[in-house]
Amino acid sequence: MDKSFSQNDKARRGWWASVVFFVVIIGLIYFLSTTKIVEENRDILVGIIGMLTGGISGMLAIASGRDPSEIEALKDKLASANADREALIARLRDAQIQMQLLRQQVFELQNAVINKLSVFTNEPPIKTLSEDQVELPEVVEQWTPKTKEDIELESQESSTQ
């Protein structure tokens, strides 16, 4: 319970700090717009104002209730989920390849039995296949994620046509 209270208190302090920061920047901009700037210090002041106004986006995010650390945590979680998704797709593709290999081997065994029972008894019936020789149906190719190389090849083929 104390942890959730401290998180709430921390969020409230961050919100107030961002509001105060915003007011200070608005005040600084107003002050500098009404005051004449000495030419010698002008570049330094413009650089400082640029750095301060660059922090306004983070301040507005905190003031609106979106903590940048929460956003980073969500990005990490999304990256992890995408990695898991890619791993599952790769496993599914490998399983489809293995299933296709097994189907072809069963077909070869069926043909071998038929050949043994028929006239062609002296011909070697089983021709083993490796994973490189497996021809996948188009359904498997549809679900295989495209790599950068595949996308580049498709774009090259479409540009040559």
Image (cartoon, rainbow, N blue to C red):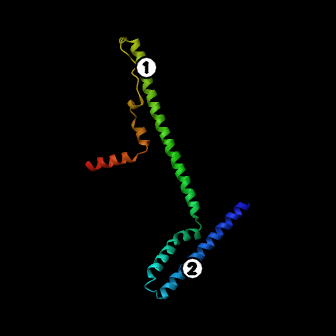
Q: Among all residues in the image, which is located at the extreme left? A: 161
Amino acid at circle 2: Val
Q: Quadrant of residue 21?
A: bottom right
What's the residue at 47%, 36% (across, down)? Answer: 94
Q: Position of residue 76 (x, y in %)?
A: 55, 54
Q: Among all residues in the image, which is located at the extreme right? A: 1
Q: Nearer the viewer, mark 1 or mark 2?
A: 2
Mark 1 — residue?
A: 110
Left or right: residue 8 versus residue 39 is: right
Left or right: residue 94 versus residue 154 is: right
Q: Quadrant of residue 133?
A: top left
What's the residue at 41%, 40% (across, down)? Answer: 141
Mark 2 — residue?
A: 24
As helix, strand or loop, the secondary structure at mark 1 comes to helix
Q: Position of residue 127 (x, y in %)?
A: 39, 21
What's the residue at 39%, 48% (across, down)? Answer: 148
